[in-house]
């Protein structure tokens, strides 16, 4: 794999200054008749509702939908919790995939085969975009939780069809 393949992966470790709202700006005003204090007392939504990962991921991960419906058109946000060593074999998506590491370390590589000599380690808080159609793979180092968002419907195509967990072995 050439190092130029890694250039396809856009990494941002912090929010750029231009994206940060000045103090007092970018805040949601209270609803009509609602005081700022009342708005602050609104209970926070329940935490993520974790369940098994969908069948297009290898067994062993947990999955939570945070926003939208990844199977439908529109914005979605999901979280994927992976045990140490969990590997998502080389694949691509029809739309951009935006990844933020919440815990652990996610090692990402570009290409059609898992090549551990050309990985980019993303630590807590790091952000990456895998552009549409970019062939990439991922490996969890330690228990790792990532948040992924994009435009649905979410789809994943494995480079090697035999790597697809949905593939049912043919009966002999």
Image (spheres, rainbow, N blue to C red):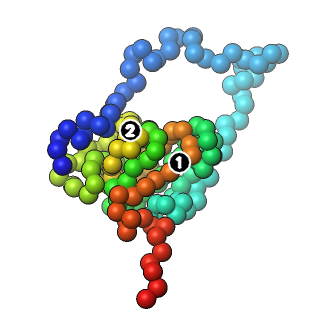
Mark 2 surroundings within 10 Å by alpha-carbon count, few (fewer than 14), some (14 through 19), many (20 or more): some
**Residue 122 badge:** none
Residue at 18 percent of width and 49 percent of height: 1
Q: Nearer the viewer, residue 160 or 126?
A: 160
Instruction: List x then y, in percent, for residue 31.
Output: 77, 19
Residue at 34 percent of width and 30 percent of height: 12
Residue at 61 percent of width and 41 percent of height: 73
Q: Quadrant of residue 75?
A: top right
**Residue 154 badge:** 1
Q: Quadrant of residue 130?
A: top left
Q: Nearer the viewer, residue 161 or 10?
A: 161
Task: Say which label, 2 or 1, has the lower sequence index.
Answer: 2
Instruction: List x then y, in percent, for residue 166.
Output: 49, 67
Residue 146 horizontal side relative to residue 141, left or right: right
Which residue in the protein does label 2 denote? 131
Q: Quadrant of the C terminus?
A: bottom left
- Number of labels in the image equals 2
Q: Secondary structure at mark 2?
A: loop
Q: Nearer the viewer, residue 74 or 127?
A: 74
- Of all residues, the one furthest to the bottom in this rendering is 172
Residue 81, visible in the rendered structure: yes
Instruction: List x then y, in percent, for residue 118.
Output: 20, 48
Q: Nearer the viewer, residue 47 or 159?
A: 159
- Of all residues, the one furthest to the right in this rendering is 33
Residue at 69 percent of width and 15 percent of height: 29
């Amino acid at each position: 794999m050439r190092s130029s393949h890694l250039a396809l992966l856009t990494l941002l470790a912090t929010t750029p200054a231009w994206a940060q709202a000045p103090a007092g700006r970018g805040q949601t005003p209270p609803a009509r008749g609602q005081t700022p204090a009342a708005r602050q007392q609104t209970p926070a939504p329940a935490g993520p509702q974790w369940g098994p990962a969908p069948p297009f991921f290898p067994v062993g991960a947990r999955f939570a939908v945070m926003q939208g419906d990844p199977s439908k058109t529109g914005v979605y946000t999901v979280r994927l919790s992976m045990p140490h060593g969990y590997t998502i074999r080389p694949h691509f998506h029809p739309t951009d995939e935006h990844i933020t590491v919440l815990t652990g370390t996610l090692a990402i590589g570009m290409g059609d085969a898992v090549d551990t000599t050309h990985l980019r380690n993303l630590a807590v808080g790091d952000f990456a975009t895998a552009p549409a159609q970019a062939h990439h793979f991922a490996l969890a180092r330690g228990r790792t939780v990532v948040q992924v968002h994009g435009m649905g419907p979410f789809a994943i195509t494995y480079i090697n069809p035999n790597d697809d967990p949905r593939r049912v072995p043919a009966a002999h």
